[in-house]
C-alpha cells in the first residue's frame, strides 16, 4: 500500500527508506518515492502562466540574487553563460547537441537557483499558448519587465537598467519586434508535435526555427550571441526542452532519436563547463546523470573527482493547453490565434525563408542564421 506524507525534512535522492512504496513530499517540494530501499525524488517544472504571483516573484528574486549577489554562486552563473557564448557557433546549436546541451545548461542554472531556494525550478514559458508573445504577462513590471526604452535598455521590473546588469556591466536590452505573427499554437501543437513527424532531422529543423524566431521577436539581448545573459532565455529554453520531451513521448523511436555513440562528448572550449559530458546522460529528463563542476570552490574543468548523481525532472502540463489560447483581455487584436504556418516535414534543402515569407518572419530567421554563421 502506498502511503503519502509531507515532511519539513530534507529527504533527498538516494537516501535509505522503508517501506517500499511510501511517498514523501520533502521541504524542497519534490515528490520522493521509496523504491528498492532508497528514495527516488522528482522535482516539477510548471508553466510560467500557471505559477501564482508569489511563486513568480520568488523565482525572479532568486534569479536577481544569483546574478547580482556576488561570491562563488554568481561566478558559477557567469562561467555558464560565458560557456554558452563561447560555444554558440562551435557545435551546441547543431542537430546533434542542441537539445541535450541546453537541457544540461538549464539544469545547471536551476541547480544554482536551488542553492538559494530549493523549492525553485525553472518554469517553462509556454509561448505557443500566448495570443501574442509580446503581450504575455511575463513582460509585466511585476515579473520580468517589458521592452526597452529608446536605447533598448529595459526600464521596469527587476531587470531594469537602474538595478540590474549583465555580466559585463551592460544593460538588458529588449526591442520587441511586433510586425511578426506572434502566435504559434497550431505551429507547435499540430505541426512540430505531429505524430507523423518522425524524422528527427525534420523535427529539429522545425523546432529550431521557432526557437530562433522567439529569440528575435523579443530581440535585443535575446537576438545576440550573448542571449543566455537574458533572464527570459531560461524560461524560453525550458519550454523548448518540454516540447522536445513531448515529442520524445510520442514513440519509443522518438525518445531515443538523438542518442549518440557512447564515446561522444559535448563540444568544449576554454571557458566551457560541459567538457567530457556525454550527451546521452540528458536524453531522459526524468533521469539525468549529473556531477557538480565546482570542485575546490571554483569552476573545475573535470568531473573525475566529483561523484555523479541522478536528478529527476518532470514537466507538469498546463490546463491552458486544452483551452483556447486566446486571451482578448491582453490583446484587443486577438484574431490571430491558431495561425497555421503551413509547415510540412522538411529536409535540409527546403527553402525555409520562402515558406515563412507570408508571415513576415523571414527577416528574423535571416538575423538568427547570420548569428549562427559568425
Image: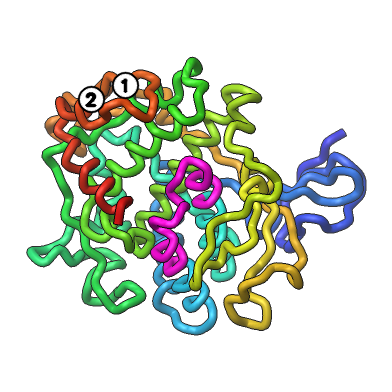
The outermost residue toward the left is: 150
Q: Residue at x 78, y 45 (%)?
A: 33
| Image quadrant in which you'd find residue 306 | bottom right
Q: What element does badge 2 sit on?
A: helix
80 sits left or right of 356 in the view: right
Specify the quadrant that holds the N terminus. Answer: top right
In the rendered image, residue 91 lying in the magenta stretch gets the answer: yes
Q: Position of residue 259 (x, y in %)?
A: 63, 38
Residue 76 numbered tag: none
Q: CA distance from mark 1 to mark 2?
A: 8 Å
Of callouts 1 and 2, the N-terminal one: 1
The outermost residue toward the top is: 196
Q: Residue at x 21, y 48 (%)?
A: 367
Q: Position of residue 79 (x, y in %)?
A: 48, 72
Q: Residues within 10 Å of mark 2 (few under 14, many from 20)?
A: some
Q: Is residue 269 above or below residue 106?
A: below
Q: Is residue 241 above or below residue 60?
A: above
Residue beneath disc 1 = 343
Residue beneath disc 2 = 355
Q: Position of residue 224 (x, y in %)?
A: 27, 58
Q: What element does badge 1 sit on?
A: loop
| Image quadrant in which you'd find residue 8 | bottom right
**In front here: 305 or 173?**
305
Amino acid at each position: 500500500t502506498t502511503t503519502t506524507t509531507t515532511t519539513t525534512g530534507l529527504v533527498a535522492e538516494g537516501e535509505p527508506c522503508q517501506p517500499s512504496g511510501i511517498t514523501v513530499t520533502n521541504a524542497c517540494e519534490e515528490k520522493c518515492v521509496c523504491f528498492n530501499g532508497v528514495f527516488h525524488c522528482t522535482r516539477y517544472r510548471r508553466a510560467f502562466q500557471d505559477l501564482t504571483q508569489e511563486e513568480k516573484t520568488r523565482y525572479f528574486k532568486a534569479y536577481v540574487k544569483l546574478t547580482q549577489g556576488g561570491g562563488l554562486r554568481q561566478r558559477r552563473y557567469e562561467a555558464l553563460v560565458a560557456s554558452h557564448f563561447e560555444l554558440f557557433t562551435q557545435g551546441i546549436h547543431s542537430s546533434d547537441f542542441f537539445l541535450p546541451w541546453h537541457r544540461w545548461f538549464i539544469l545547471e542554472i536551476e541547480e544554482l537557483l536551488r542553492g538559494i531556494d530549493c523549492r525553485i525550478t525553472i518554469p517553462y514559458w509556454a509561448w505557443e499558448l500566448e495570443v501574442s508573445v509580446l503581450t504575455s504577462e511575463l513582460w509585466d513590471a511585476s515579473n520580468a519587465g517589458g521592452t526597452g526604452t529608446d536605447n533598448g535598455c529595459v526600464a521596469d521590473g527587476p531587470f531594469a537598467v537602474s538595478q540590474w546588469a549583465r555580466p559585463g556591466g551592460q544593460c538588458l536590452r529588449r526591442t520587441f519586434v511586433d510586425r511578426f505573427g506572434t502566435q504559434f499554437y497550431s505551429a507547435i501543437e499540430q505541426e512540430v508535435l505531429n505524430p507523423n513527424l518522425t524524422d528527427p532531422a525534420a523535427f529539429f529543423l522545425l523546432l529550431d526555427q521557432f526557437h530562433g524566431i522567439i529569440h528575435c521577436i523579443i530581440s535585443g539581448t535575446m537576438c545576440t550571441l550573448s542571449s543566455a545573459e537574458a533572464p527570459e532565455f531560461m524560461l524560453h529554453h525550458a519550454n523548448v526542452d518540454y516540447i522536445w520531451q513531448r515529442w520524445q513521448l510520442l514513440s519509443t523511436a522518438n525518445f531515443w532519436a538523438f542518442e549518440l555513440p557512447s564515446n561522444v562528448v559535448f563540444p568544449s572550449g576554454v571557458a566551457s563547463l560541459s567538457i567530457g559530458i556525454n550527451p546521452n546522460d540528458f536524453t531522459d529528463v526524468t533521469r539525468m546523470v549529473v556531477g557538480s563542476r565546482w570542485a575546490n570552490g571554483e569552476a573545475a574543468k573535470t568531473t573525475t573527482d566529483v561523484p555523479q548523481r541522478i536528478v529527476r525532472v518532470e514537466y507538469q502540463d498546463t490546463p491552458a493547453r486544452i483551452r483556447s489560447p486566446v486571451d482578448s483581455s491582453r490583446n484587443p487584436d486577438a484574431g490571430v490565434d491558431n495561425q497555421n504556418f503551413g509547415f510540412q516535414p522538411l529536409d535540409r534543402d527546403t527553402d525555409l525563408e520562402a515558406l515563412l515569407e507570408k508571415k513576415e518572419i523571414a527577416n528574423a530567421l535571416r538575423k538568427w542564421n547570420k548569428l549562427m554563421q559568425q
